[in-house]
Structure formats: C-alpha cells, structure tokens
Amino acid sequence: MNNNYNLKDDFPDDFLWGASTSAFQVEGAANEDGKGVTVADLRTKKSKYLDSSVTVDHYHHVEEDVALMAKLGLKSYRFSISWARIFPHGNDKKPNQKGIDFYNKLINLLVKNNIEPIVTIFHFDCPISLVEQYGGWASRRAIDDYYRYAKTLFELFGDRVHYWLTINEQSLLANVPSMNGIQDNNLHELRQKSENSNYYMFLAQAKVYKLCHKMFSNSKIGPAVSYMTNFPYDHTSENALKSKSMEDLIAFIDMDVAIRGELPTYYLRYLKDKNLVLDICDGDFETLKEGRANFLGLNWYSSSIFKITDVENPKMLDGVISNVEKVTDERMMNAEWGLSYDPVGLRFAMQTVNDRFPHIPIIITECGWPEREKLENGQVHDQKRIKYLNGYIYELREAIKDGVNIISFNPWSFLDLLSVNDGMDKRYGLVFVNRDNNSEKDLARYPKDSFYFYQKVIETNAKNVEILNINSG
C-alpha cells in the first residue's frame, strides 16, 4: 500500500529564492533624470538622518548590484518602480524616457542573469504632484491615474516581468494616512479620508488585476500585504478576539478583497461602528468582483504578543491598533526595533492563510532581521541574521510539507537601505553598504556572512538548513 499521499516533502526545484528592496530606499538619484518628487521623498527629508536623495545609490550601481545578485545565485528579485520616475507628476501626458531606460536596464540585467523580476507597482511613493492637484489617494481621481501608470508598466516591461505586486502594505497606508500625503486637522475627517483612500486603492487594484489578466494570461499579480501574526498576552477570550480583529483589519482585509473580490462583513461593521461612509458608486462592487489577484505577496517578519490597555497608539488612527500594548517575550531572540525571532510563528501564519485561501500561491515578499552593524576588515559577521534565515527557511519547508503553496522567498533586504526613522542604523541587508547617517563614504558593497549562508541555501535548495534550538536567544 502506498502511504505517501502525494505530499510534498521539500522546496520544489523551481522555487524562486530571492531578495527584496524598494525604490525610494535604495535608488537615490531622487532629483536626477527627470524624476518627480514623492511623498516618500518628503517624509525622508523630515528625518534627523539622511534622506532619499542618495540612500545607497543603487541607481548608479545597478550593474555592480545585479552582479552581486548573480554571485549570490538569486532566482528572483523583488523591487519597486518609482511612479514619479515614470510619470514625474503622476499623470503626465508622456512617460519620462530616462526613467524607462533605467528600469529597462535593470530588468534586462536581471533577465540576462536568469533572475526573475518581481515588480511592485506602488511602494509608499505617491507623486506629490497628485496630492497637490487633487489630494492623491484621498480622491477617486487617483484610480484612473494609477490604472494608466500600471498599464504603462505592463506595456513597457510586461514581456519580461511575469510577477507583479500592485500596492505594498495598503493597510499601513490607510492607517497612517500621512504616508500617502493625506492630512486633516479633524481626526474623524482624517479617518474618513483614509478609509476612502483605502477603498479607492481596492478599486484601482481590481481594475489592474483584470487588465493584467487580459494582457498577460500567464502572468501572476497580487498585493503585497503587511501580515503580523498576533497572540494574546493572557490567553483570555477578550485579548484573543482583539488579536484576531487586528489581524483581520490590518492583513486579512487586503487578502480577502484581493482574492474574494468583495468587502468583508467585519470591515463593513467596523465602518458602521465608527460612523464612516465609503464613496460607493454604481458598478464598484462589480469592479471588485471582476478583478481579483491570483497569488498573495506576504510581508511577514515576526509574531507579536498584545494585551489590552487604556493607552491610545499615537502612530495609528483610532480603531484598529489602539488601546493595546505590545509585550516582549524575553525567551525569544529580540531585535532592538521590536521584531522577534519566531520561525514556528511563520509556519503557523502560512497555515492560517492556507486555511482561508486553500492552495493560493504565496510569495514571501519581505522577511528579515535588523541589526546595528560595523564593517571590520571588510567583513560583517551577522550571526543573528543567519540564525533567523535558517529557522525561517526550515519552517517554510515544514509549511510546504503541510500543503501550503509557497513559491518564492524574498527576504528583506538585498542591500542595506534607508529606513525612514532610523537612517542607516537599522540594517537588514545581505550586503553591507559602506555609508552612515552623516556621510556617503565610498558606498562600497561588502557581502556579509549571511550572504554566503544564503548563497549555500540557494545552491543546495536549502539542504544546508537544519533545525536549531528555535526559542533560545
């Protein structure tokens, strides 16, 4: 009797081992070759550290950086295109040729090196001109401008790009509306604007999903969702329900709309309870139903433990992540910036998504470990990142054995890059970039120890990954 039940027991041979970045965090050249100003550019200028004008200068180091990707053995590279590098004002009559030339150069280099481009259409960088013209994503007009921008990308690069991500971490943009340039002194009006921006982004993506399926029937397109698995601190039903509600309104709402093509009931109730009204027009619900994603991109870094408190969260708008306190589990390895090492949490998260959307293809679009690091004799010994990668990759294999359809892993990030609130102190990269908050230095690239560990992962299809004591610090 055959008892294998046709279960998968390892990463498939065509698994896309990759890495991730975003345009405003690595490219630099923010004021060169016709690029327009974005909300992200202005946000970085308010930082006490460096801004997006140079960052790690990927724009001028693209050949060197792709050569390092090839040396690493990457099978995929997830990056974003800057809307304002293609349309400096967001809705110009003609696209910016020098911006087109740069992305053609990058994509062609990737293809030449057998690296699959995974392209994010919009990653936190709305052209500021659209905000000045009509409020940006706070206006329904943004739907048509985003659609035209995406259509232009499909026409320019769709012959070589087979994986598209529509919007990165939409729920974060909705709950921190200043990241989309949306402001209002009245908090209820600000929440109203932010929820309608959320709705307009849903509609815009649905139109773009449908367009992509029409233009490229063999391509895959989906959202890049911010997904944090929450566990209740004291195991009470009240805290468990709050943890689930946060997951629903931060992560699963983006997945539910993308895959099911409708606004979920838990979200509609939230709007009703908060006295928020969406700008719903005739045909909108048909638009959502007709345009749906065929995979999910998930940004999953760690689990979090929460308990209910009387304290408001000043970073988020009222109602989603409010009146809660994050609790640190000292039994785990914890990073300075609030992330914890919880590889089994990743497996649990993958099972949870698969239970909700059986067999949906999943790309891990972000997943990484931040540290303060120094270059010593041309080397960086980032052992905690190696432990993080080893543990998470081990549990991804276990998730595949569970039946989860994971097709790609793209840890954040390939290069050290600009973190808006932490400059260059918060380093995620597999490759160290020689600069700090105050000086560009020589911007030289140095592969870290984790680079060579991950190189072996790719070379052996993770045969070098072994189980460790996953809970030790």
Image: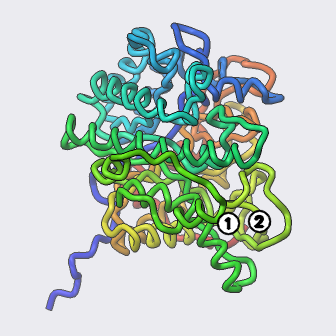
**Can you say whether 192 is above or below 238 in the image?**
above
- Left or right: 7 as drawn, with respect to 229: left
Numbered circle sitting on residue 144: none
Q: Are marks 1 and 2 in contact (CB under 8 Å)?
A: yes
Disc 2 marks a residue whose amino acid type is: Lys
Q: Name the residue under label 1.
A: 304
Q: Mark 2 points at which residue?
A: 326
Q: Position of residue 364 (x, y in %)?
A: 46, 53
The answer to whether any part of residue 248 appears in the image is yes
Identify which residue, 36 or 76, lies in the foreground. Answer: 36
Report the residue that reaches farthest toward the bottom.
1
Disc 1 marks a residue whose amino acid type is: Ser
Task: Count neighbours of disc 1 (C-alpha within 10 A) and say few if under 14, some if 14 to 19, many if 20 or more.
Answer: many
Q: Position of residue 256 (x, y in %)?
A: 42, 61
Identify which residue, 253 or 438, lies in the foreground. Answer: 253
- Left or right: 398 as drawn, with respect to 181: left
**Residue at image coords 57%, 61%:** 249
For numbered disc 1, what is the local secondary structure?
strand
